[in-house]
Image (cartoon, rainbow, N blue to C red):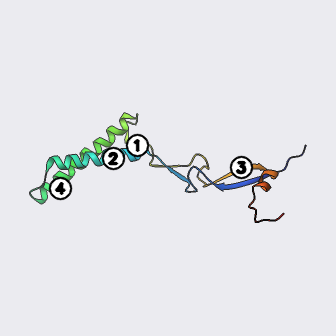
Amino acid sequence: MNRYLVIYEHTCPVCNGERYIHNTEWEQANDAYDKAQAATSAELGEPADEETYYNNMRQALDAAQQALGAFWAERGYFNERNWPPEDAICYECEGSGIVREEVDLEVALYNLPSKINL
């Protein structure tokens, strides 16, 4: 039996053609960062002068960075250089945004829009 195949190209369903997928763990990591920074800022209170303001900001940022490090350490990433990227190349389309599949010609013709008269 002979079989005819065609290549069917369509937008990647995983990344929606964007070529990258977002690591949702980073949303949680950024939440931990923001909460630590806000908590430290609230704890330190209103600064009396400009120097105190900058010192408070530095302490808040340090606390936030420590919270971010702790977040990733809980997940096994102990070195900042080894943290996962926020966006990674899509595993489905390998970063092309398009998925190519071999489809039987009969199936392809059946799925063509009805506006085409064959």
Q: CA distance from mark 2 to mark 4?
A: 23 Å
Could you tell me residue 39's position as x and y percent? 22, 46
Could you tell me residue 73's position as x and y percent? 36, 35
* Amino acid type at mark 3: Glu
Circles 1 and 2: CB atoms closer than 8 Å: no
| First along the sequence among labels 1 and 2 | 2
Nearer-the-camera pick, 108 or 76:
108
* Amino acid type at mark 1: Arg
| First along the sequence among labels 1 and 3 | 1
Q: Secondary structure at mark 4?
A: helix
Q: Which residue is mark 3?
A: 101
| First along the sequence among labels 2 and 4 | 2
Q: Closer to the observer: label 1 or label 3? A: 3
Circles 4 and 1: CB atoms closer than 8 Å: no
Residue sitting at 74 percent across and 61 percent down?
Answer: 113
Q: Which residue is mark 4?
A: 54
Q: CA distance from mark 4 to mark 1?
A: 28 Å
Outermost residue to the front: 114
Q: Closer to the observer: label 4 or label 3? A: 3
Q: Closer to the observer: label 4 or label 1? A: 4
Name the quadrant of the C terminus: bottom right
| First along the sequence among labels 4 and 3 | 4
The local crowd at label 3, few if under 14, some if 14 to 19, many if 20 or more residues have their Cα within 10 Å, is few
* Amino acid type at mark 4: Tyr
Q: CA distance from mark 3 to mark 2?
A: 39 Å
Q: Which residue is mark 1?
A: 81
